[in-house]
Image (cartoon, rainbow, N blue to C red):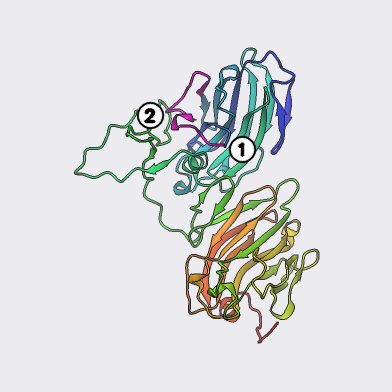
Amino acid sequence: MNTEVVKGQKADLTKGNPGIRSVTVEIGWKAPSSMDIDASAFLLGAQGKVNSDDDLIFYNNPSTPYIRYKDVPGTASGGLKQFEVSLDKIPANIMKIAFTLTLYDGENRKQMFGQMSEAECRVLDQATGSQILRCNLGNQFSVETAVVVGELYRYGEEWKFSAIVAGFSGGLKALCGNYGIEVEDEPAPSSAAKQPEKAAPPPERTPLQVPPPRVEPSRPALVIPPPPAPAPKQETPPPGLNLNLKKIELKKKGDSINLKKSASGLGELLINLNWNQKQGGGLFSRNKGGVDLDLACLYELKDGSKGVVQALGNAFGNLQQQPYIMLDGDDRTGSVTSGENLRINGSKVAQIERILVFAFIYKGVTHWSEADGVVTLKQDGGPDIIVNLDEHNNRKGMCAIALIRNVDNETFSIERLVQYFSGHREMDEAYGWGLRWVAGSK
């Protein structure tokens, strides 16, 4: 049995191969020699979390009685890692094993998995060396510094393989947090304090700087030393995101992430604005004072067309025709707890140049600091992208939230802004849209 799987597919491993007791999960790739890539395996319980810090298998914690990490010598242009897994010895409380790749210090080194090529994952019969299944990771990645390659998981009495092939920013620290391992940044060394002796790195490689857990009375935490001093600030700063596998939060001005078009396209993108609708007359409850908070966007298409999608002036847009963006109505009463939504036709990415998502207070007092506003971009088959309106300017009634750009006619880049303006004209001038504005109503 030799099965080819692609992203999102699942395949039987032991069913149909009843004699298999042990397998080798092998991950290989080609990349520039300056990229320090390593593989890890997370041993997960029923809730998708580890039971202890020892359930992270990597070169500094390479083995248990049923799984062993192997660093196979590679070449200057490639790498190869293996995990030998004894399926019949895995404890009953381990429900799945997630295999991952991480890029050490990628954000500071300006490196990303988009520079990796010819990556694949193979599952081999350990006894015979024959291939059971193969997953080509393909050209799935751009700015990511961590990749969940796939999972071995229980299905009744059998074992199956799921091709996850999902890339995220945040490196090993983000993956540890997602799987329930506490991670602490090691404090900067003090000249007056004696530093603990560090474990020696494995030969012939630049290690991930993750020493073994500290011994403490309570549950130990992995300790990651501080990264090197960041490079001088560039015109477009690299992404610095705090991520998990279900959502991406753009936390600082300039943080960005790419939405890469898959074989089936980007699909529909939904942008939701929600806020604290306090009962009993709170500012954004709109039960007192008649506050009306609106979600809207400026757009520019590839043919040079420009305009606005907003409830003001009844410019609700169109999803199937230009501008391929539509506003789902206008809630003026506060009765719709799901907030307001903009929808973007992702299949028309090649026709869209850029989109500026913004919110404004059409009626009411400008107390953004009490709103707890949050904007969520939802995409088919990918994590939610979150922008919290946690920076405030209560003197201005309009907030530019995020800028969506067409990168290569297949990819949208999402950048956090959270910049406040007095009105449409001031915001237009700041981002160079060049529209003519007149007073309007709804």
Q: Which residue is mark 1?
A: 117
Tag 1: amino acid: Ser
Along the viewing direction, whichever of 228 and 246 lies nearer the viewer: 246
Visible residue check, residue 127: yes
Q: Which residue is mark 2?
A: 201
Residue 158, quarter of picture:
top right
Measured in 3D between alpha carbons, the distance from the residue under mark 1 to the one under mark 2, in whole angstroms, is: 26 Å
Along the viewing direction, whichever of 173 and 219 lies nearer the viewer: 219
Considering the numbered disc 2 on the image, is that residue within a helix, a strand or a loop? loop
Along the viewing direction, whichever of 273 and 218 lies nearer the viewer: 218
249 displayed left or right of 109? right
Residue 134, quarter of picture:
top right
Residue 230, above or below 40: below
Residue 185 location, x and y as percent? 37, 44
Quadrant where the N terminus lies? top right
Residue shown at the point (53%, 43%) measured from the top left: 145
Residue shown at the point (42%, 28%) measured from the top left: 60
Near mark 1 (Cα within 10 A), the count class, few <14, some 14-19 or many ≥20, is: some
Q: Main secondary structure of the magenta part?
A: loop
Tag 2: amino acid: Pro
